[in-house]
Amino acid sequence: MRFKRSAPGAGSRVGGVELLDRCDNVVFLGLSGVGKSHLAQALAYRAAAVGYRRIGYLSFCREEATLFFNVVAKRYEHGSIVVTSNLAFSQWSSAFAEDQTLTAALLDPLLHHSHIMQLAGDSYRLEDKRKARQPKGKS
């Protein structure tokens, strides 16, 4: 798995909860199965009070998109948000009722104090399935 950091040393800061004291956000991006949710849950476990939501798996209707925008807006500079997505930011409007204006307005505060972690690699779930199909004694 390759782990690209948005800034030098960002990975070491994400493991600690000091970024939450600064109300920074963390966004994990990558294909399905590369560990985004696992990393987000590990961070949430350490912080105990971090919000967690998957974006891009299912699209929001306009009302849901507006509600999520309101959550981001209210937490802006008051609390951290951890988000995982299998979509690039340029594709997020497809998850938010195809509303590019709302999506841009949501991304602005979300990304302002964010540490963006781009994950790449093969899906752990698919790798486990491939291993399970191989005859015993072969790897």
Image (cartoon, helix red, strand yellow):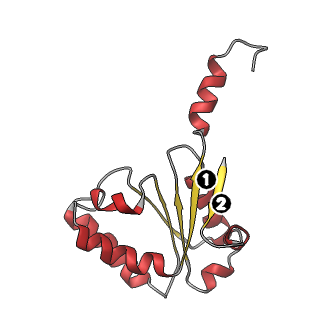
Crowd band around label 1 with a 10 angstrom C-alpha radius: few (<14), some (14–19), many (20+): few
| Rendering coords of residue 66 (x, y %) | 26, 71
Which residue is the site of mark 1? 38
Q: How crowded is mark 2: few (under 14 residues within 10 Å), some or many (20 or more)?
A: few
Question: Separation of disc 1 and disc 2 at Cα?
Answer: 6 Å
Query: To which residue does mark 2 refer?
Result: 42
Residue ID at (52%, 81%): 113
In front here: 19 or 1?
Answer: 1
- x then y, percent, for residue 59: 29, 54
Q: Residue reaching furthest right? A: 137
Q: Is 82 situated above or below 76?
A: above
Above-or-below relation of 76 to 10: below
Marks 2 and 1: in contact by CB < 8 Å? yes
Q: Is mark 2 on a helix, strand or loop?
A: helix
Residue 96, located in which quarter of the rendered image? bottom left
Q: Which amino acid does label 1 sit on?
A: His
In the rendered image, residue 43, in percent from the top left (x then y), is placed at: 64, 65
Residue appearing at x 58%, y 49% in the figure = 120
